[in-house]
Amino acid sequence: MAANEVSVGKIEQMLDWAYDKSLNGIPGMDSAYEMAEGFLSKHDTADQAIDSLIRWQNTKAATSGFLTGLGGIIIMPVTLPANIASVMYVQVRMIAAIAHMKGYDLKDDQVKTFVFVCLTGKSASDIFKSTGIKVGNAFAKQGVIKIPSKVIVAINQKVGFRLLTKFGEKGLINLGKAIPIAGGVIGGAVDGIGTGIIGKTAKKVFV
């Protein structure tokens, strides 16, 4: 496999990196915690704050210059096109913020895995069904019950495969790792992945 070829393994590594940066922050950008608390402070309910966050991500994340500052400070664990890495970071941070607003512990491995599943958007329900996990009102109760580690591994693999397929369908992989992080490129990428769908999926999963 070529060094710059995208694989499920590389996507899984990048997801872990994006999650860590979302929780601990990147210089000049709010962490998921800070983002969540900021939106919560401006609204009466968590649902209102989440809806506002999703709308903001839809409009602001695709604007020119939103991610241009990431180029010099991102040190990635694997070689992936900058556009894919940036999209993952933006989306993971949004979902993590939603989970935090709903009262979930972002340091819990189960919550982390469910954040990743939300990235697949409409495919999330299929992934949950294939691994025997019921989502919805029952998830709050299920969250107390530890999901076996082998199931978490299986879920993460399914997420990685689905994202690899999705990025390929959108043509993001073919843009190449040398593409600079420019507003236009990232804007189209974020829009193509479907921020709104992912946000709504997260709202349903983290009840």
Image: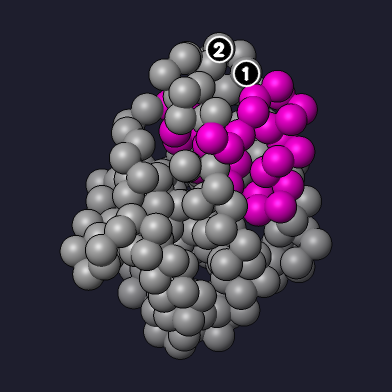
Q: Position of residue 157 (x, y in %)?
A: 67, 31
Q: Which residue is mark 2?
A: 148
Q: Residues within 10 Å of mark 1 (few under 14, many from 20)?
A: few
- Predominant SS along the magenta part: helix
* Residue 151 circle label: 1
Spatial CA span between label 2 and label 1: 5 Å
Identified at 80% across, 62% down, the residue is 169
Q: Is residue 126 left or right of residue 32?
A: right
Residue 75 appears at what percent x and percent y?
38, 53
Q: Left of 150 or right of it: where is 139?
A: left
Which element carries disc 1, helix, strand or loop? helix
Residue 80 in which image quadrant: bottom right
Q: Nearer the viewer, residue 185 or 91?
A: 91
Q: Residue at x 68, y 32 (%)?
A: 128
> What span is colored magenta in the figure?
109-137
Q: Residue at horizontal 35%, vertical 36%? A: 104
